Image (cartoon, helix red, strand yellow):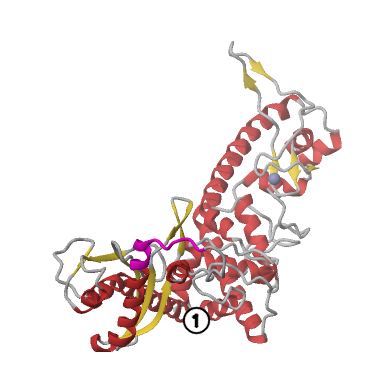
C-alpha cells in the first residue's frame, strides 16, 4: 500500500501481492513523515506548506544537450515564506536535495546527512549546499539559496523591462533619436504608406529619413506624420503593415516639407552651378525641380560629383569647339568656290563657313549643345586616320542620340562657347529657376 502510494500508482486489489521491499517501505514512511512535519511545523520557521508532490507527480521533464531528460525526485515540496515568496525543492530522501527556479536552466542544491530523519533535518542547522560552502545551514537557508538566482534573474528582467520602456518613451518624444534608430536599423521606406503623400511627398519623407542634422520645426511636423505610418513600437524599424490614410494636418505638414526641401535643393543646385558651371547633369536636376519634383536622396548625395563631371564635360566641349573652329577655317578656304556667288557677295566668308557647318555639325535635342564631328586620330605609325563618314554620332556632352541637323541660330554658341545662350524664345536668362533651356518638358530620362 505504502509502496503504491509513494509511487503514485493505483492500489492493487485482491490476488497475490508482491512482498513490499523493506527499503522502499522505509523510504515511503520517511516521505510521509516529511509531509506531516512540513504541514505541522513549517509555521514555526516562518514557512507555509503550499503543496507536496510525491515521485510520479514531481517528475520534471527538461531538455539538455538536445535530449529529453527528467528529474525524478522522491518529492517536490512547495512552501512560501512570510513575504509570500514561493520556495520549491526537490527532495531525495536517500541522498540529495534540489532547489529550482521554476525552470530547470539552473540548480541550487543542498544536502543533509540527516535526511532519513526528517524531524532533525527540518529543525537543525545541518544542511550544506552542494557547493560545499561549509554546512551549518538550515533547510530554509538552503531554500532561500536555491531561490536567489531566480530572484536575481527576475530583478534583472524587471530592470531590463524598465530600461526598454524608458527607451521607447525617449524615442517617442525625440524625433531626432527615433530617426537615428531608423537609420541604424535601415528602415525600408518604400511603399503605399509613403506614396499616399504623392510622389514629391514620398521623396521628401525619404530625404527626411536620410538627413542627419537636427530637425527643423517643419521637419519635426512631417516626421510626426511619417511616424503614423510606422509600427506602434518605436524600437521596431518597419512601416505599419497597412497604410493609415493621412489626416489633413499630416498632408499639410508633408506639403510644407516638400516646399522647404525644394527651396533647399534649388539653392544647392544654383550654388553648384555658380561654382562649376552648368552641364547636363545639373541642368537635369534644375529641370526636375522646376517641374515640381524633388531630387532623390541618392541624387542629392551625388550632386557635387555630378557638378564636377559637368565641369569636365564643359571643358571637353570647349576644347572640341576650338578644334572645330580651326578645322572650319581650313575647310572654308578650300571650299570657298562652292558657295553660290550671290551668297558670297552678301555674306563673304560666312557663306562657305555655313557649308562646312552644315556638313559637320549637329545639335543635341537633349542638352541643347552643339555636337562636333569626331576628330581624326593617329595610328601607331603616326598616320592620320579620318573618322568614317558614316560613323553614328553621339552628343559628346550628354551622350544623347537624338541629334537635329545644324541650324544657324546656334551660331553664337559656336562662336562664343561656354554657357552662352541667346536670351528670349523658350529660354530664360535668369529668375529663380535659372536657365530654362529644355522647352519640350524633358525630365526624368537618363542623360
Ligand atoms: Zn547632348
The image quarter containing residue 340 is top right
Please tell me in which quarter of the rendered image ligand 1 is found: top right
Give x and y (percent) for residue 324.
65, 34
Give x and y (percent) for residue 72.
42, 62
Q: Which residue occupies the extreme top position in the image?
A: 381
Give x and y (percent) for residue 163.
38, 76
- Residue 421 vs residue 16: left or right? right
- Residue 113 vs residue 431: left or right? left
Q: Residues within 10 Å of mark 1 (few under 14, many from 20)?
A: few
Task: Answer above or below: position of 218 versus 311.
Answer: below
Task: Answer above or below: position of 43 versus 239.
Answer: below
What residue appears at the point 58 percent right and 67 percent down from the top-left corner?
238
Highlighted magenta segment, given as a residue range: 17-27
State the residue in front, 188 or 235: 235
Do we see residue 170 in this rendering? yes
The image quarter containing residue 256 is bottom right
Q: Which residue is mark 1?
A: 217
What residue appears at the point 29 percent right and 63 percent down from the top-left corner?
96
- Residue 75 vs residue 375: left or right? left
Amino acid at each position: 500500500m505504502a509502496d503504491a502510494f509513494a509511487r503514485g500508482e493505483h492500489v492493487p486489489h485482491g490476488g497475490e501481492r508482491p512482498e513490499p521491499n523493506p527499503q522502499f517501505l522505509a523510504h515511503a514512511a520517511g516521505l510521509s513523515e516529511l509531509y506531516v512535519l512540513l504541514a505541522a511545523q513549517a509555521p514555526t520557521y516562518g514557512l507555509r506548506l503550499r503543496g507536496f508532490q510525491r515521485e510520479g507527480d514531481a517528475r520534471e521533464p527538461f531538455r539538455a544537450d538536445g535530449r529529453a531528460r527528467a528529474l525524478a525526485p522522491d518529492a517536490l515540496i512547495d512552501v512560501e515564506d512570510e513575504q509570500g515568496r514561493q520556495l520549491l525543492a526537490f527532495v531525495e530522501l536517500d541522498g540529495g536535495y534540489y532547489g529550482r527556479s521554476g525552470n530547470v536552466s539552473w540548480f541550487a542544491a543542498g544536502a543533509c546527512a540527516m535526511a532519513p530523519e526528517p524531524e532533525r533535518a527540518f529543525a537543525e542547522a545541518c544542511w550544506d549546499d552542494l557547493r560545499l560552502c561549509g554546512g551549518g545551514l538550515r533547510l530554509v537557508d538552503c531554500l532561500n539559496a536555491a531561490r536567489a538566482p531566480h530572484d536575481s534573474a527576475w530583478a534583472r528582467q524587471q530592470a531590463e523591462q524598465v530600461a526598454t520602456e524608458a527607451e521607447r518613451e525617449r524615442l517617442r518624444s525625440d524625433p531626432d533619436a527615433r530617426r537615428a534608430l531608423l537609420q541604424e536599423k535601415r528602415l525600408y521606406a518604400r511603399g503605399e504608406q509613403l506614396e499616399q503623400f504623392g510622389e514629391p511627398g514620398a521623396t521628401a519623407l525619404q530625404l527626411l529619413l536620410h538627413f542627419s542634422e537636427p530637425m527643423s520645426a517643419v521637419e519635426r511636423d512631417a516626421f510626426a506624420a511619417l511616424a503614423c505610418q510606422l509600427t506602434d513600437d518605436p524600437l521596431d524599424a518597419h512601416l505599419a503593415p497597412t497604410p493609415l490614410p493621412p489626416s489633413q494636418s499630416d498632408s499639410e505638414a508633408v506639403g510644407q516639407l516638400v516646399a522647404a526641401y525644394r527651396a533647399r535643393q534649388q539653392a544647392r543646385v544654383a550654388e553648384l552651378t555658380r561654382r562649376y558651371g552648368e552641364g547636363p547633369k545639373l541642368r537635369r536636376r534644375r529641370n526636375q525641380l522646376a517641374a515640381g519634383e524633388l531630387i532623390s536622396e541618392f541624387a542629392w548625395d551625388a550632386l557635387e560629383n555630378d557638378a564636377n563631371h559637368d565641369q569636365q564635360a564643359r571643358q571637353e566641349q570647349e576644347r572640341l569647339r576650338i578644334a572645330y573652329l580651326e578645322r572650319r577655317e581650313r575647310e572654308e578656304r578650300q571650299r570657298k568656290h562652292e558657295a553660290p556667288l550671290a551668297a558670297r557677295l552678301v555674306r563673304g566668308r560666312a557663306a562657305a563657313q555655313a557649308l562646312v557647318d552644315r556638313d559637320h555639325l549637329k545639335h543635341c535635342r537633349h542638352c541643347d549643345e552643339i555636337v562636333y564631328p569626331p576628330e581624326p586620330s593617329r595610328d601607331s605609325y603616326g598616320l592620320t586616320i579620318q573618322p568614317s563618314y558614316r560613323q553614328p554620332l553621339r552628343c559628346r556632352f550628354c551622350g544623347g542620340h537624338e541629334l537635329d541637323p545644324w541650324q544657324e541660330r546656334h551660331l553664337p554658341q559656336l562662336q562664343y562657347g561656354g554657357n552662352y545662350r541667346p536670351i528670349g524664345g523658350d529660354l530664360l536668362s535668369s529668375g529663380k529657376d535659372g536657365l530654362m533651356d529644355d522647352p519640350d518638358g524633358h525630365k526624368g530620362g537618363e542623360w
